[in-house]
Image: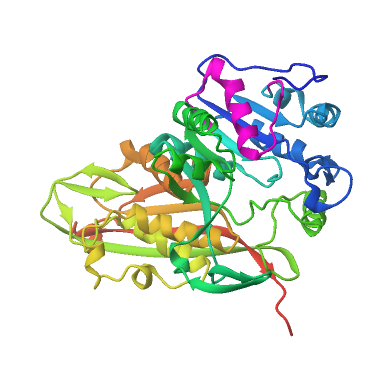
C-alpha cells in the first residue's frame, strides 16, 4: 500500500539489475525527542536524505524503494526535496511499513515484485555513512552467493548467559570471538528467494526476525558474511546524532570506530611491499589474481602471486601489523598451494577493522616474461574486486631490468607495491 499524500517519483524499468529497499518506518523512540531519528538533521540534512543520496549516487543501483510509516509522508517529502533532481529520479513512491522491521521489508519487496530486480539490497535508513566500496562489495557478494551480509570483527568478549534473576545472568558459553561478526546493512540477496522467504514466514505468522540474513537462514538459504565497514555505524543513541552532525557538517562521513576517544582526524599512511619468486617448470603464473599462460611456473608455497603478495605486505605495513609471513606462515600446510586472493582480502579486512579506508593500490611487476599488457585491465578489475575498492583506485605497471640481475637473466620475477590508506588518528591519553 502506498503511503498517502506523497507524490510518485521515478521508477526503473522492469527487470532492472539492482534495487534497494530502504527501511525507514521505525519510530526511533530510543533516541528521544519527538521526531524519528531518520528525519533528524545532521550537517543540515535529514539522516534519511543522506542515506538515500548515498545509495542513489551509485550507478549500479537502478531503483530505490523507501518504506515509511503511515503518518510520515510530510517528513519523507521534505527529504525528497533535499535531494538533487538526478538522484531523486531513482526514488520510487514510498510504501507503508508494518509493525516490525520484517513486515516493513516485505512491504518494500512486494512493491518491487512487479518489476523484479536481479539483486535487492536491504538497508537501514539510520545508516547514512554507507559508501561506494561497501555498496559495491554488497552487490558483488549478492551476485556471487545469493545471500550475503556485511560484518565486522567483534572486538569485545561476548558471553551467552542464562537469566537467573532480574538483571543477573549466569555465563553459559564464551564463543571464540574470531568466529563472531557484528552484522550491518546493506544486505544483498537474489530477489526471488528473499521474497519467497518473507512470504513463507508471513504464512507461518513469524514476524520477529531482526535482519534479513536471519530470515534467509531460517528459510534454508546459505548466507555468507563479507567485509563490512566500522565507519558504517547505525545512528541509535543521542551521541550518534551529535557525532553525525559534526562529521557531516565538516564535510566528511568518516565516523569514529566504536570506543575510540577524542578522534580528531584521519591520518594518511603509506605502506610498501616486495615479493620475488624463482621460475620452475610449469605452464602459467598467477599475477594479480589472474592466471596467465607462460612457458614456466614459479616456485612457491602458495600460488606464488608476487603482485598480491607484495600488495598484501604493503597494506599490512600501512597499519603496522607484521607481514604476510606473520599471518600466513609458510610452515603452515594450510597455505600450501593456496590462492593469494585470500591473503589480500584478509589484509583489507584488517584495515577496515581499524576503521580505515583504502585510497589507492599501486603495483609494479618486474619481469622479462610473461608480458602483462594484454592482461592489465583484467588484473586491475580482479584486485579492485578482492579489495572492495573502485577500479580507479588500482594501478598496475610492468618493467624489465634491462637484462640485469636475476630478473634480467629470466630466473624469476618480482613485484613491488604501495598502498595508501587513511586510519583514524586518536589522541592518546597522557
Picture quadrant where residue 86 is located:
top right
**Is residue 144 found left or right of 247 in the rendered image?**
left
Extent of the magenta region? 92-120
**Is residue 168 found left or right of 353 in the rendered image?**
right
State the image coordinates of residue 30 (x, y, percent, origin top left): 78, 52
Residue 5 visible, this orientation: yes
> Residue at position x 55%, y 15% from top?
114
- Determine the residue located farthest toward the right in the rendered image: 34
> Residue at position x 55%, y 19% from top?
113
- Determine the residue located farthest toward the left in the rendered image: 281
Residue 57 visible, this orientation: no
- Determine the residue located farthest toward the bottom in the rendered image: 430
> Residue at position x 71%, y 24% from top?
94
**In the rendered image of this protein, does residue 243 appear above or below residue 89?**
below
**Is residue 66 found left or right of 16 in the rendered image?**
right
Residue 104 is a magenta residue: yes
Q: Along the line of sight, which residue is nearer the eye, 129 or 198?
A: 198
**In the rendered image of this protein, does residue 82 appear above or below residue 267?**
above
State the image coordinates of residue 100 (x, y, percent, origin top left): 66, 39
State the image coordinates of residue 85 (x, y, percent, origin top left): 76, 23
Residue 25 is a magenta residue: no
State the image coordinates of residue 397 (x, y, percent, origin top left): 40, 48
> Residue at position x 59%, y 38% from top?
207
Q: Quadrant of the C terminus?
A: bottom right
Q: How is the image coloured?
A: rainbow
**Is residue 258 found left or right of 322 in the rendered image?**
right
**In the rendered image of this protein, does residue 360 appear above or below residue 262?**
above
Question: How many callouts does the rendering have?
Answer: 0
Picture quadrant where residue 121 is located:
top right
Amino acid at each position: 500500500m502506498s503511503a498517502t499524500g506523497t507524490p510518485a517519483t521515478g521508477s526503473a524499468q522492469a527487470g532492472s539489475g539492482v534495487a534497494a529497499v530502504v527501511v525507514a518506518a521505525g519510530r526511533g523512540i530510543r533516541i528521544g525527542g519527538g521526531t524519528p531519528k531518520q528525519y533528524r538533521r545532521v550537517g543540515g540534512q535529514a539522516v534519511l536524505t543522506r542515506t538515500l543520496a548515498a545509495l542513489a549516487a551509485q550507478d549500479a543501483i537502478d531503483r530505490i524503494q523507501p518504506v515509511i510509516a503511515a503518518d510520515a509522508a510530510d517528513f519523507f517529502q521534505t527529504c525528497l526535496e533535499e535531494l538533487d533532481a538526478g538522484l531523486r529520479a531513482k526514488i520510487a513512491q514510498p510504501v507503508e511499513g508494518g509493525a516490525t522491521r520484517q513486515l516493513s521489508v516485505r512491504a518494500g519487496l512486494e512493491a518491487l515484485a512487479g518489476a523484479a530486480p536481479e539483486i535487492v539490497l536491504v538497508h537501514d535508513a539510520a545508516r547514512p555513512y554507507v559508501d561506494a566500496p561497501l555498496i559495491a562489495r554488497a552487490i558483488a557478494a549478492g551476485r556471487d552467493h545469493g545471500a550475503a551480509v556485511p560484518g565486522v570483527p567483534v572486538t569485545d568478549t561476548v558471553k551467552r548467559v542464562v537469566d537467573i534473576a532480574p538483571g543477573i545472568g549466569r555465563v553459559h558459553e564464551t564463543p571464540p570471538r574470531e568466529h563472531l561478526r557484528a552484522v550491518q546493512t546493506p544486505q544483498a540477496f537474489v530477489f526471488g528467494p528473499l521474497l519467497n522467504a518473507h512470504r513463507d514466514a508471513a504464512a507461518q505468522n513469524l514476524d520477529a526476525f531482526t535482519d534479513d540474513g536471519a530470515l534467509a537462514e531460517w528459510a534454508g538459504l546459505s548466507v555468507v558474511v563479507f567485509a563490512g565497514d566500522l565507519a558504517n555505524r547505525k545512528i541509535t543513541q543521542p551521541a550518534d546524532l551529535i557525532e553525525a552532525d559534526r562529521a557531516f557538517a565538516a564535510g566528511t562521513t568518516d565516523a569514529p570506530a566504536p570506543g575510540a576517544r577524542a578522534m580528531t582526524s584521519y591520518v594518511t599512511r603509506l605502506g610498501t611491499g616486495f615479493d620475488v619468486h624463482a621460475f620452475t617448470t610449469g605452464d602459467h603464473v598467477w599475477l594479480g589474481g589472474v592466471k596467465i599462460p607462460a612457458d614456466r611456473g614459479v616456485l612457491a608455497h602458495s600460488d606464488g602471486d608476487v603482485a598480491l603478495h607484495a600488495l598484501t605486505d604493503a597494506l599490512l605495513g600501512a597499519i603496522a601489523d607484521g607481514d604476510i609471513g606473520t599471518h600466513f606462515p609458510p610452515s603452515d600446510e594450510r597455505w600450501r598451494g593456496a590462492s593469494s586472493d585470500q591473503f589480500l582480502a584478509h589484509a583489507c579486512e584488517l584495515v577496515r577493522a581499524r576503521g580505515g579506508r583504502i585510497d589507492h593500490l599501486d603495483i609494479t611487476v618486474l619481469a622479462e616474461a610473461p608480458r602483462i599488457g594484454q592482461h592489465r585491465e583484467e588484473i586491475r578489475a580482479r584486485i579492485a574486486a578482492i579489495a572492495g575498492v573502485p577500479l580507479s583506485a588500482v594501478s598496475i605497471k610492468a618493467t624489465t631490468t634491462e637484462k640485469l640481475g636475476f630478473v634480467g637473466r629470466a630466473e624469476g620475477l618480482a613485484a613491488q607495491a604501495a598502498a595508501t590508506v587513511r586510519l583514524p588518528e586518536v589522541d592518546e591519553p597522557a
